[in-house]
Image (tube, grey):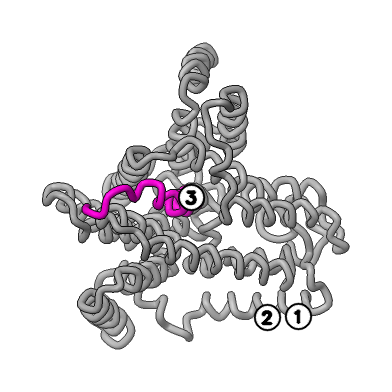
Amino acid sequence: MILIVGALAVVYIIFLFQDPAIGLTALTVYCFLFGILAREVGGLAYGIGIELFLLLIWIAVIILNKRYDWKILNNTLTKLMLAWFIISVVEIINPAGASVRGWLQEIRSTGLFPILVIPLVFLLYNSKQKLNLFLILVLSLSLLATINGLKQQFIGLSAGEEQFLKDGGEITHVLWGRLRVFSFYSDAGQFGASQASFALLAMVLAVGPYKWWKRLILLIIAGLSFYGMLISGTRGALFALVVGAFFAIFLTKNIKVLIIGGTLALMALFFLKYTYIGNGNYQIYRLRTALDPQEASLNVRFNNQKIIGQYLESRPFGGGLGVIGTWGKEYNKDKFLSTVEPDSYWVKLWAMYGIVGFTVWFCMILYIFGKCCGIIWKIRNEGLRYKAIAMMSTCAGIFFCSYGNEVMNSQPSSLVVSVFLAFIFLCPNFDDKPES
């Protein structure tokens, strides 16, 4: 195995230094599928492979620097991500005294990953063809995850997946004797949110000005992804779909679409909230509980937020990176925040960065979204505009869904959001013709 992997690595590096864009494509595939290696092979921390891919890509880009127009990095998105990374670095001296090892682990996904990936998109994916290929790639990978999820649901689990449940995953992934499908991902929450976001992406693209057979394929992918969301049992994924759908309807600036789309979305919510139709189906019943304000787990989350809020009243800069969640339990057992479950990426950032850092992050994201909306409304090419709307609504759905789960900070959603936002900023460069 070592010889085979070594040989493949040599071939990969040869191609990488010919075209570093191959590295970014390989990273995308890895971010979707490394969970297979973690469960079925094990023995290594495969998450570090993401940093290894990024390191090699950046080495190749720096060596071949004369090929690229570095001025393209002088944009608002890159500057804001750099500012957030600097804030994350400064958190190492947070007076709350969190572990440096916890900070090092947390900053990888929270601050380092976006500032390493987004500039690479501007440098390596700066063409309409690369945008099209990336959309095809992520939709294909998501469909592969859906198929594996269906296999888990109707055929059974692999040896690695069974072991995942035995090692503690059963507590959250087997409810009332029913499996919450998780596919290749770290957990069912990430799988459900990812499936919801890709169902939305495919649906928006399906109404675009494309050939009929492409629209049919996209509708099939959307339907399968929606079913994948249902069998994940992830109730918060509903909000990725609903919020993203309203964003897509809003961005069209088409009164007819606004009325019809808004009416259909409200009817769907009314069906879930005020009727009992379909309760015999477990997936529909569980999804319906997402709209129940008295739901037990929701009230546990609200109670945890009150506890965190009281603790942070005297700590405006939070408890420091890595003080809560997985790394908090491992490296900050002596800290109070490590004993409280965040159950939300928003809450996790609030606990780590404090109200000051969370406000900066929240305003930064909303500003980026506003900037993206402005870019989309100026795009003349109808086909390109629908792609941008699909990407923007997907990012919005993932962002709001992250209030319920740590979606935006996990793979592959973190990669998808970073690449999609960079592509939207690049869209004016692709908008060369007014026709579709």
The amino acid type, in three-letter code, at marker 2 is Lys
Up-down relation of residue 327 to residue 23 (above or below): below
Residue 331 vs residue 410, the one in the foreground: 410
Where's residue 312, x and y in %? 77, 75
Q: Determine which residue is flagged by label 3.
A: 422
- Residue 434 in the image: x percent, y percent? 26, 54
Give the mark nearer the N terminus: 1 vs 3. Answer: 1
User: Which residue does the image show at 58% across and 27% down from the upper left?
Assistant: 65
Q: Which mark is residue 310?
A: 1
At 79% from the left and 79% from the top, the residue drawn is 313
Q: Residue at x 58, y 66 (%)?
A: 344
Quadrant of residue 300 within the rendered picture: bottom right
Whether residue 67 appears in this view of the structure is yes
Mark 1 crowdedness (10 Å alpha carbons): few <14, some 14-19, many ≥20: few
Q: Quadrant of residue 237?
A: bottom left
Q: Is residue 88 above or below residue 292?
A: above
- Compare residues 87 and 228 and report the one nearer the observer: 87
Look at mark 2 in the image and give the residue it sits on: 306
Could you tell whether 320 is left or right of 424 in the image? right
Q: Is residue 271 above or below residue 2?
A: below
- Marks 3 and 2 in Cβ contact (< 8 Å): no
Say which of marks 1 and 3 sits in front. Answer: 3
Q: Position of residue 315 (x, y in %)?
A: 82, 72
Disc 3 residue type (three-letter): Ala
Magenta residues, as a range?
418-436
